Image (tube, rainbow, N blue to C red):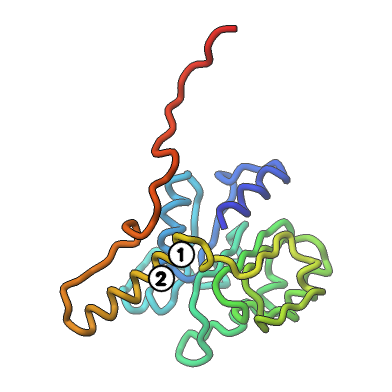
């Protein structure tokens, strides 16, 4: 998500600190993203109705307010079809059309959170940028939609070495907890040592 924003900022010559990023779904990934954006001085709006109700959080907004006030909308929710706050087609035709020209839409959560047919129609106006890592009918992908996207990646989030290490340790730790075993694993222990441990800035020698 951050990589896509950095590239778009460079291509379109805007400052990320001048943009407001709306994060829909503020669980593990959404919270992590919000922290990183805050560290970069980028304003965020947060939307997570289940968490807001559960924790009585006052600093969150509803999704329609978020869409109206954000330059970037990024989804980090699970896919649900039932309950008080289903996320299936959460980004529907009306909400897609509510995106202001120049907006950036990012979905790296689950494909059906965004109505892909409605998105394809919205993209005919060619006035927003869309970044998708997930698609509604995976593993089948609508190539007509892909052609209209600014960036399209093949659901790669879990394929990185760090992602695999984290997934492995999460399963191991959950099993140990379930079995009341004391063992715990840390993802860092499964990763190789970085070839460059730190970078030191030094003045260039005079020529």
Residue 53's label in the rendered image is none
Extreme residue toward the top, this view: 207
Judged left or right of residue 200, residue 148 is right
Circle 2: element type: helix
Which residue is painted at 78% across and 60% down in the image? 127
What residue is at 69 percent from the left and 78 percent from the top?
94
**Residue 189 drawn at (x, y percent):** 31, 58
Q: Is residue 57 above or below residue 53?
A: above
* Residue 75, horizontal then vertical, whole percent: 55, 69
- Could you tell me which residue is drawn at 44 percent across and 60 percent down? 162
Residue designated by label 2: 167
CA distance for labels 1 and 2: 6 Å
Q: Please tell me which residue lies in front, 113 or 191.
A: 191
Point out the residue furthest to the bottom here.
82
Residue 176 in the image: state x and y as whole percent. 23, 78
Q: Quadrant of residue 110?
A: bottom right
Quadrant that contains the C terminus: top right
- Is there a contact, CB below 8 Å, between mark 1 and mark 2? yes
Q: What's the mark number on residue 163?
A: 1
Q: For the point 44% across and 77% down, which residue is it?
A: 49
Relative vertical location of residue 192 with respect to residue 93 in this rendering, above or below: above
Counting other residues with Cα less than 10 Å from the Cα at mark 1, is it few (<14), some (14-19), or many (20 or more)? few
How many marks the image carries: the answer is: 2
> Which is nearer the eye, 125 or 144?
144
Secondary structure of residue under mark 1: helix
Check disc 2: other Cα within 10 Å, few if <14, some if 14-19, many if 20+: few
Q: Position of residue 133 (x, y in %)?
A: 63, 68
Q: Is residue 192 above or below residue 75?
A: above
Query: Left of 137 or right of it: where is 62?
Result: left
Quadrant of the snapshot with the N terminus: bottom right
């Amino acid at each position: 998500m951050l990589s896509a924003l950095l590239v778009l900022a460079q291509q379109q010559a805007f400052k990320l600190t001048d943009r407001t990023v709306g994060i829909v779904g503020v669980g593990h990934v959404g919270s992590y993203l919000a922290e990183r954006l805050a560290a970069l001085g980028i304003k965020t709006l947060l939307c997570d109705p289940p968490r807001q109700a559960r924790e009585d959080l006052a600093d969150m907004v509803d999704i329609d307010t978020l869409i109206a006030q954000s330059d970037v909308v990024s989804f980090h929710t699970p896919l649900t079809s039932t309950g008080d706050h289903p996320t299936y087609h959460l980004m529907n035709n009306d909400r897609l059309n509510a995106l202001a020209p120049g907006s950036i839409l990012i979905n790296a959560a689950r494909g059906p959170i965004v109505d892909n047919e409605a998105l394809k129609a919205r993209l005919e106006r060619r006035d927003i940028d869309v970044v998708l890592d997930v698609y509604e009918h995976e593993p089948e992908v609508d190539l007509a939609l892909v052609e209209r996207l600014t960036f399209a990646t093949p659901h790669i989030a879990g394929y990185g070495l760090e992602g695999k290490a984290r997934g492995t340790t999460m399963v191991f730790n959950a099993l140990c907890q379930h079995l009341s075993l004391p063992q715990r694993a840390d993802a860092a222990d499964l990763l190789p040592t970085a070839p460059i441990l730190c970078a030191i800035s030094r003045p260039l020698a005079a020529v």
